[in-house]
Amino acid sequence: MTADHPVTDTAIIGSGFIGRAWAISFARAGARVRLWDQAADQTAGALAYIGGVLEDLARNDLLNGKTPKSVLSLISVASSMAEALAEATYVQENTPEVLATKIKVFEALDGAARADAILASSTSALLPSRFTENLKGRGRCVVVHPINPPYLIPAAEIVPSPWTSPETVERARRFLVSAGHAPLVMKRELDGFIMNRMQGALLEEAFRLVADGYASVEDIDIGIRDGLALRWSFMGPFETMDLNAPGGVRDYAQRYQGIYENLFAQMQRRVDWSGEVMGRVEAERRALLPTEHLQQRQVWRDKRLMALLAHKRGQAKGELG
């Protein structure tokens, strides 16, 4: 895979919710996708799920001008891992977050994949060094961690191990961009990567505010949903700072660092998410959304994401035009 020879063949190893979501993303970009799962019934379910999602994406003009049928024609089920890997120059692994499983799967991938194939893991919690260290081809192994579902949320983290080659990182970055993604390229591995560390900081404070009786669960959600997230849906925190002070980001830091420095000292205490506070959090959430309506609300969430993505793409085209 070079700039002149983009990825045309991919393999998805593990076809659960993350695997099938990657399959949609890659096929929509025009790459052939071969799905393989140790549980054969998973792939049949994956194809049915993908077919339904493609119809929704088409209604929101999110198939890059393609039809659901043409995208689905690029996705096939392999009868074995070897068959799935035979032509793939990019492999996305999506097995459970169990270290022993990752080690075993990557040993198999390294032994069976083409010599020029990138081996990427969707893990959200395991450092790549922990399951690639003893592989002959460890230099071509990398984490590519999405926010689910990747066919709706473009950001994806590229996390190298100490021995991942710069070429592998660049090839993975280039492929993700060609598939419509917005890669975050980490310089080195770190627990939680980037997105979970940022999200974790916000969740820690949300639990503290509820546990200490300062706000309700819904108040917290309103503050993000109808406040900060409106900006964050098209700007990151550093650009937000840059535009929120007359002189830019340095001016912002000089004006407001003292406020946040004072707050930081109050944020050094953890609240057990599964402890006493969970009774309050769960009770408030179930009052707003009964358990039997969770799945229906998840569908609503994905449709709202589709509409938001369509809007953002339309805005971006208008800016370029």
Image (cartoon, rainbow, N blue to C red):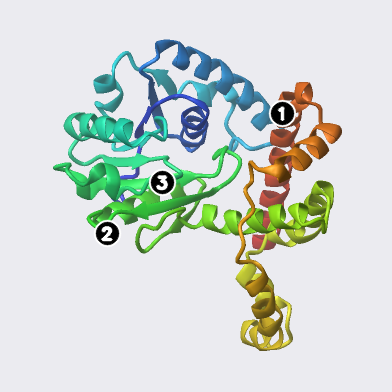
Whether tag 3 and tag 1 are in contact, CB under 8 A, the answer is no
**Numbered label tally:** 3
Q: Quick check: 53 above or below 196?
A: above
Whether tag 1 and tag 2 are in contact, CB under 8 A, the answer is no
Q: Position of residue 291 (x, y in %)?
A: 76, 25
Q: Quick check: 234 above or below 51?
A: below
Residue 166 bears which disc, if any? 2
Q: Position of residue 93 (x, y in %)?
A: 37, 34
Residue that extends furthest to the left in the rendered view of this protein: 136
Viewer-side residue, 300 vs 77:
300
Q: Which of the two marks, 3 or 2, is nearer to us in this view?
A: 3
- Which residue sits at x=61%, y=57%? 270
Kind of residue at badge 2: Pro
Query: Badge 3: how crowded within 10 Å, few (<14), some, or many (20+)?
Result: many
Q: CA distance from mark 3 to mark 2?
A: 14 Å
Residue 75 bears which disc, if any? none
In terms of secondary structure, where does tag 2 sit? helix
Q: CA distance from mark 1 to mark 2?
A: 39 Å
Residue 144 bears which disc, if any? 3
